[in-house]
Structures are given as structure tokens and as C-alpha cells.
Image (cartoon, rainbow, N blue to C red):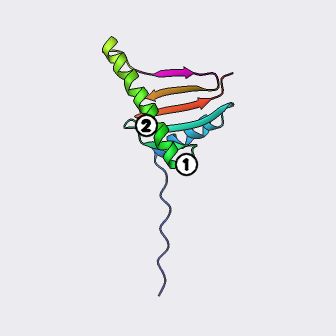
């Protein structure tokens, strides 16, 4: 009796390939310290953080900031849409950007140039 062949690994979907490609391109950019890619609800999908607890904490803080910025935009002009926000400190620069087509939020923390 012949054993059944193991199932072939599932091929990544278009969305998974897009997510992996975006994450790798951002991560390899010069001066980038941390990257978090979140879904619109705020759940981290990809991250450079090794500690899951820290990742979730950071994601929650950035999503809160993102939501407040979106509310401000809507209150100012209901036809406008949030695309990018940059917060710069002495040591870091955090950029929060939206990809409404794929329902993603990108958080990139890098050293300022």
C-alpha cells in the first residue's frame, strides 16, 4: 500500500506577497530602525519587533494617533483622506501612512537624516 503524497504547500496569495514585498523593501531602507504593518483595525501583520508584547503596545499607540489624525481630517474636510503623517523627535522620525486600497497602515521609525 502506497502512502499518500504530502500536500503541496499553499502558495501565498497576492495580498501576502504584497505584504511581504512591502515589509522587506521598507526594512532594507537605510536608517530604518523599526517597521510595523497593521491592518486597519490595528492588528500587527508584520513587524521587526522580536517581543510580541512591545509590538502590540507600539501598534496600539500608533493606531490611536492614526485614528485621531483621521478624525481631525474628517472634521476639517469630509471629502479629504488621511495619507501620511510624520512625527520627528531628536532621536527618531516616525512616519505613519495609509494604504486604503489594501486596508493597511505602515509605521516606520527611522533615524532622521
Comparing 77 with 34, the one in front is 34
User: Quadrant where the C terminus lies?
Assistant: top right
Q: Earlier in the sequence, mark 2 or mark 1?
A: 1
Question: Residue 63 magenta-drawn?
Answer: no
Q: Position of residue 102 (x, y in %)?
A: 42, 35
Element at label 2: helix
Query: Is residue 8 placed above or below 96 in the rendered structure?
Result: below
Give the numbered dot on residue 60: 2
In this image, 50 relative to 71: left or right? right
The residue furthest bottom is 1
Count neighbours of disc 2 (C-alpha within 10 A) and say few if under 14, some if 14 to 19, many if 20 or more.
Answer: some
The answer to whether the residues at label 2 and label 1 have Cβ atoms under 8 Å apart is no
In this image, 100 relative to 87: left or right? left
Q: Position of residue 88 (x, y in %)?
A: 58, 21
Q: Position of residue 106 (x, y in %)?
A: 50, 32
Query: Is residue 70 placed above or below 5 in the rendered structure?
Result: above
State whether residue 100 appears in this view. Answer: no
Question: Residue 83 magenta-drawn?
Answer: yes
Q: Residue at x 49, y 21 (%)?
A: 85
- Range shown magenta: 82-90
Query: Is residue 34 placed above or below 95 in the rendered structure?
Result: below
In this image, 71 relative to 13: left or right? left
Comparing 3 with 53, the one in front is 53
Q: Residue at x 51, y 43 (%)?
A: 55
Give the numbered dot on residue 104: none
State whether residue 103 appears in this view. Answer: yes
Comparing 93 with 91, the one in front is 91
Give the numbered dot on residue 51: 1
The residue furthest top is 76
On the image, which quarter does residue 91 sit in? top right
Q: Position of residue 14 (x, y in %)?
A: 47, 44
Element at label 1: loop
Amino acid at each position: 500500500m502506497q502512502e499518500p503524497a504530502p500536500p503541496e504547500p499553499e502558495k501565498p496569495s497576492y495580498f501576502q506577497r504584497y505584504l511581504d514585498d512591502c515589509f522587506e523593501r521598507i526594512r532594507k531602507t537605510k536608517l530604518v530602525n523599526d517597521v510595523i504593518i497593521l491592518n486597519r483595525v490595528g492588528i500587527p501583520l508584520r513587524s521587526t519587533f522580536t517581543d510580541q508584547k512591545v509590538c502590540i503596545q507600539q501598534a496600539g499607540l500608533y493606531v490611536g494617533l492614526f485614528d485621531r489624525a483621521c478624525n481631525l481630517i474628517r472634521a476639517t474636510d469630509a471629502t479629504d483622506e488621511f495619507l501620511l503623517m510624520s512625527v520627528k523627535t531628536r532621536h527618531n522620525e516616525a512616519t505613519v501612512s495609509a494604504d486604503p486600497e489594501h486596508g493597511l497602515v505602515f509605521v516606520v521609525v527611522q533615524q532622521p537624516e
